[in-house]
Amino acid sequence: PVERIGHITREQLEVLSDARTRKQQKDDLGRHMGINQQEGFHTEILRDFHYNNYLFCMENKFTPEKTSTFLSLMKVVYERSISRRESAADSFTAMKDLLLKHSVQRPPFSVGVFSFDNLKVITDFVANTFYRHYKLYKYTYESHRELDIRIDDGIQYRIPFVESFTEDDEVDPRDQPELADMFEAEHAMTGTA
C-alpha cells in the first residue's frame, strides 16, 4: 500500500500565498516542511530547495493537493538521497517510483494525484534542477572525503636495464651543437667560437 504523503495543509498553503515577502514565504515554508536545524548553510540550502519547488508548483498552477504532494515527495526524495548517500541514478529511479505511485488511482497501491502531463513537467523540472546539481547537494553533507587510489591493470612492470657509464663516455657539453646557445655568453667573453 502507498503511504499518501502530505506535510503541508491547504490552510498553510493559503498563508504562504498571502505572505508579503519572499523571506517570510521561505521561513513559513521551512517551518511547515519540518526544517528544525540550527540556522546555517544546510538550513538555507533546504529552504531554497523547498521554496524553488513551491515556486514551480505556483508557476504550473497546481492545486493545493498537488502542491502539498509534490513538496512532500521532494522532501522524502531529498532526505532519502542524502541519508542513504544514493547515486543520482538510484535516487532518480526512487523519485520516479514515488511519482508514479501518486499518479495512478489504484487504491491501496497508488493514489492518482498527478496527471500524465504533470508527470512530464515534474520529471523535467526535477531533472533540470535537483538532479542537475545533485552532486553539490550531496557534497554539502560530506564532512570529509577519503581518497583511496589503487592501480591494478594486471600488467607487471619491469624496471628497464640501465647501462653503466664510465668517464670515457662523458662528453664536453660545449662541443654539443644542441647546447651551443647556452654557452654563447661564455664564447663571447673568451673570443672563441
Image (cartoon, rainbow, N blue to C red):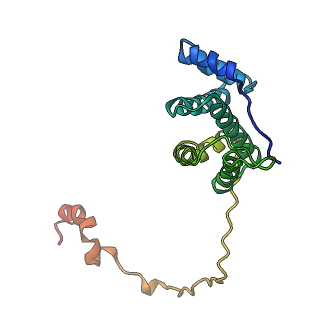
Q: In the image, is 57 to the left or to the right of 13? A: left
What residue appears at the point 80 percent right and 42 percent down from the top-left corner? Answer: 3
Residue 39 at least partly seen: no
User: Looking at the rendering, in which quadrant would you find the C terminus?
Assistant: bottom left
Name of the residue lying farthest toward the top: 20
Say which residue appears at 54% left-offset and 42% top-offset. 129
Query: Residue 42's x, y, as percent?
Result: 67, 31
Q: Is residue 140 above or below residue 167?
A: above
Observer-nearest of 127 and 170: 127
Residue 6 place in picture, x, y as percent: 73, 32
- Residue 120: image location, x then y, percent: 54, 49
Q: Is residue 145 left or right of residue 125?
A: right
Tell me if residue 47 comes above or below residue 116 in the rendering. Answer: above
Residue at (67% x, 27% y) in the render: 43
Front-most of 93 and 87? Answer: 93
Please state which of residues 27 and 109 is positioned toward the viewer in this rendering.
Answer: 109
- Among the 4 quarters of the image, the one containing residue 76: top right
- Does residue 44 appear in this view? yes
Residue visible at 51% across and 34% down in the picture: 60
x then y, percent, for residue 63: 60, 30
- Residue 116 lies, with reference to residue 13, above or below; the image says below
Q: Quadrant of residue 21?
A: top right
Q: In which quarter of the view is residue 44 placed?
A: top right
Along the viewing direction, whichever of 131 and 164 lies nearer the viewer:
131
